[in-house]
Amino acid sequence: MHYTRLFILIIALLPLRLFAAIDMQAHVASDEGKEAYTDYISEQNAYYTGNYAYDQLITLSGDALFGRINQLMGNTCKLNAWGLDYGDLRYAYVDVDRDLNRSGYIIGYYDGKQLDGDWGSGWNREHTWPQSKGAKKETTMGHDMQSVRPTNTSVNSSRGNTAYGEGGSYYDPDDEISINNSAYKKINLGTYRGDAARVILYDYLVYGEAGGNKNSLYNGNAQLLSKLGTSGVFESIQILLKWHMQDPPSLTEMVRNDGAQDYQGNRNPIIDFPELAIEVFANYNKITSYAVTYHIAEEVSPKYQHTLADGFITYLTSSDGSHPAQVSVTGGKAEYDATLGRLIITNVTGDLTISTTTPVTNITADTRAQASIYNIAGEVICITEQPNQAMTQLPSGIYIIRQGATTRKILIP
């Protein structure tokens, strides 16, 4: 199984990496649900390659990251090349938004209700980014499968074109998802807050412009920073990112991400790699950033260091697929689910320190000389930059420490 890598800042002397799995949220109990997740991982791996590989994307932030994602979308979105239009959506949802436990039915947006997949059976098409605010159905943005969703007609009408947000003047899809199918577990179903945020982010990344970066799909109405507030599409960037982080991607989103790619060629990268949303706005001056330090005796990646006072979510998964039994956090309020490996942190007031109970051993070298530490294969683990930087933490194994003309082998049980 492939694991995405989330929210890490490299610390001390030891390069660290952590492999973190995208959360299934215990969303589907059926065998097809498990197979769908396996397919999702395979599709995800195949899509991000070369300059668009995850290890390349995560080195970027701000306008540079926007530009790279925007370029990928421009290269892979085939809506125009394949001649797809607004009418085609009516008959494609039955595959893209399929109910994993009942053939011919789809899962409705905003409420998660089961709907007959046949067009004309009481549902219509919802523009997450409203037509009146730039996503007219005649434009590519207005018939994009990733953002135009099947919705119960009455639910669609209740939203109208109201901007998303938490205040009284906004539309808040905060009701717990209600899927009328006993095969769907009730635990961790979440809401549609995160789904809506990820669609808005997607539209901006695909059809907007930042730092002079825009592709052939550019729509001047998709400028998110000019579409904030009651007359826009979202209350604020802070609320958008808060919803995104506190209601992470579910298996329903992952399945439709695969289906949308089959339909039009491109994926929603914010579903695949939620942390990229934070990095896109890393330089936005209304976002408060704090350093995140991990004390984990395993390799971890990437060098993530941005979060919000409203909270964030990360996933802690070891390279063998297991989750740490316990996690402690200083600098914020934390809730940890060891079964899912999900760590939710809120009330952040400063730099965060996250640690696990994984045993580590302190190694102290002679402070009079620089020290180099190697693993048993002869690969450099770390080199102290100054003689007084003499302590690090290592997991169990055999190591070689070299200081000047002195070399010694140590065993950490």
Image (cartoon, grey):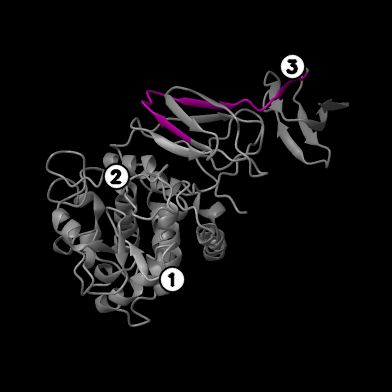
Residue 283 pos. (x, y %)? 36, 42
Q: Using the numbered discs, state the Cα–Cα distance from disc 3 to disc 1 in whole angstroms.
A: 54 Å
Question: Which of the pair 228/23 is nearer the observer?
Answer: 23
Secondary structure found at label 3:
loop
**Mark in front: 3 vs 1:** 1
Residue 336: where, in percent of width, then height?
A: 49, 31
Q: Residue 163: image x %, image y %?
A: 17, 50
Q: How many marks?
A: 3
Residue 211 location, quadrant? bottom left
Q: Which residue is mark 3?
A: 367
> Residue 127 sits in which quadrant?
bottom left
Is 107 placed above or below 321 here?
A: below
Q: Tag on residue 30?
A: none
Q: Which residue is mark 2?
A: 240
Residue depicted at x 14% and y 58%: 157
Q: Are marks 3 and 1 in contact (CB under 8 Å)?
A: no
| 410 vs 272, nearest the viewer | 272
| Magenta-colored span | 343-365
Q: Nearer the viewer, mark 3 or mark 2?
A: 2
- Specify the amino acid type for callout 3: Thr
CB contact under 8 Å: marks 2 and 1: no
In the shown orientation, is residue 57 left or right of residue 134?
right
Q: Is residue 403 visible?
A: no
Q: Residue at x 78, y 41 (%)?
A: 379
Instruction: Reply yes or no: does residue 112 show up in magenta.
Output: no
Identify the residue position indicated by label 1 in the image: 76
Q: Say whether marks 3 and 2 touch (CB < 8 Å).
A: no
Residue type at mark 1? Thr
In terms of sequence position, does the residue under pointer 3 or pointer 1 come before the other?
1
Are there few (<14), some (14-19), or many (20+) residues within 10 Å of tag 2?
many
